[in-house]
Image: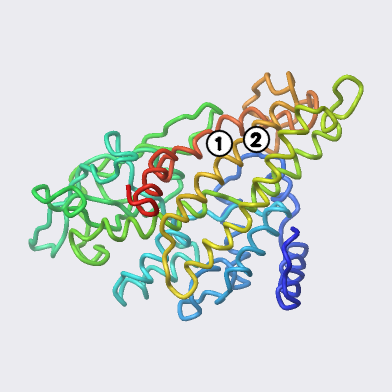
Amino acid sequence: MDLNFTPEEQAFRAEVQQFLKDKLPAALAAKVKAGQRLSREDQSEWHALLNERGWYANHWPEAHDGPGWTPVQKFIFDNECALAGGPRIVPFGVNMLGPVLIKYGNEQQKSHWLPRILSGEDWWCQGYSEPGAGSDLASVKTTAVRGVDAGGDHYIVNGQKTWTTQGQHANMIFCLVRTDREARPQAGISFLLIDMNTPGVEIRPIRTLDGDREVNEVFFTDVRVPAENLVGEENKGWTYAKYLLTYERTGIAGVGFSVASLEKLKAVASRVQRNGKPLDQDPQFAQRLAKVEIDLENMKTTNLRVIAAVAGGGVPGAESSMLKIRGTEIRQEILSLIRRAVGPYALPFIEEAQYSDYAGAPVGPKEAATAAANYFNYRKLSIFGGSNEIQKNIISKMILGL
């Protein structure tokens, strides 16, 4: 990282590096660096280690047990973790729901749910997209009808969510539900917290190209949800959803993970031979390698600007959409170049090679085992969190006034 840090920031960077050296399990880092699949236990172990140090909810305010870091400190932490092979923090509870509860939740919700996010007692997933409401999120049709009976004030939820990442691990889901079918689309949506173990909730896996079941469909059939699980005001959920999406889109950019992937790409390109020379000396490949590195360096600065926008409670607007577009394009280009670098060795797809206990003989460069699977899996980056086409519409509206 070539940014000019102050002496205090350099000291913090050294502190993070020492923590990673002392606490990051070697086996876990090896999995991450190899691009292998992580289990729920792997991710929970990392979350617990960070929480023990007080670094898990690293953008929460100190009043809610966050470390009170500056944007630059968070930037340093994310980059150093990625370079060391630290797993990506599962964002749904701590990075998405947490900020919404802190800003819009009532005191009872904050005191109940925030500590459970930190402890790992609750594992959250996101209930936004539906079969007919992906990029057009305001078209959600899952309904929540409020009623009162002998069992108390409650909602009855019916509908379907899709592309629910890690829903198979979750015990809780935060959902956008339609509570007013007569209002204009954005005005009739509410933000509801639902226990996945409630009768009427069904999860069905969606197998992806690499054989994983990372994403799921979630069905709700007459699911009873306590009215106290409504966040904020009824029919104001669109406001909370947009606030959450700025955090999601900023995180999708994954600057730190792009930095780590670029290091892997350079290592592969320096070892693989083409026409008797290392691949990084091939003019065409070297040109693409140089371009993606320049783009990434530029995005580091943009990332700092966007993170700084949320310091002190602010919310980034079109900047997060810009970062999401460029970040996903850069990550996809790096993964594409890794796949190209290992060449024909990326063609065989061995699903078992995605796991750390695979004992098969390596074929070609060590990166070949996961090159194709990672390339295909991360084509999704430009679609989820609001497709890049939608982000361009947001930019044109908010900045250009079109």
Residue 120, how many percent across, how many down?
Answer: 49, 62
In this rendered view, identify the residue nearer to me: 401 or 44: 401
Q: Residue at x 24, y 63 (%)?
A: 230
Q: Which residue is mark 1?
A: 378
Quadrant of the image containing the N terminus: bottom right
Helix, strand, or loop for circle 1? helix
105 relative to 361 in the view: left or right: left
402 relative to 233 in the view: left or right: right
Image quadrant assignment for residue 172: bottom left
151 relative to 84 in the view: left or right: left
Image quadrant assignment for residue 316: bottom left
Q: Residue at x 58, y 63 (%)?
A: 48
Return the disc, 2 or 1, that comes first in the chain's sequence: 2
Tell me the amino acid under the disc marked 2. Answer: Leu
Callout 1 environment at 10 Å: few (<14), some (14 to 19), or many (20+)?
Answer: some
Q: Which mark is residue 73?
A: none
Helix, strand, or loop for circle 2? helix
Please say if the residues under marks 2 and 1 sit with CB atoms less than 8 Å apart: yes
Q: Residue at x 86, y 32 (%)?
A: 271
Residue 33, how many percent across, how many down?
Answer: 71, 44
Specify how the rendered protein is coloured. rainbow
Residue 87 visible in the shown view: no
Q: CA distance from mark 2 to mark 1?
A: 8 Å
Q: Which mark is residue 335?
A: 2
In this rendered view, identify the residue nearer to me: 375 or 320: 320
Residue 150, how many percent across, how many down?
Answer: 8, 63
Looking at the image, the residue that sits furthest to the right is: 276
Tell me the amino acid under the disc marked 1. Answer: Tyr
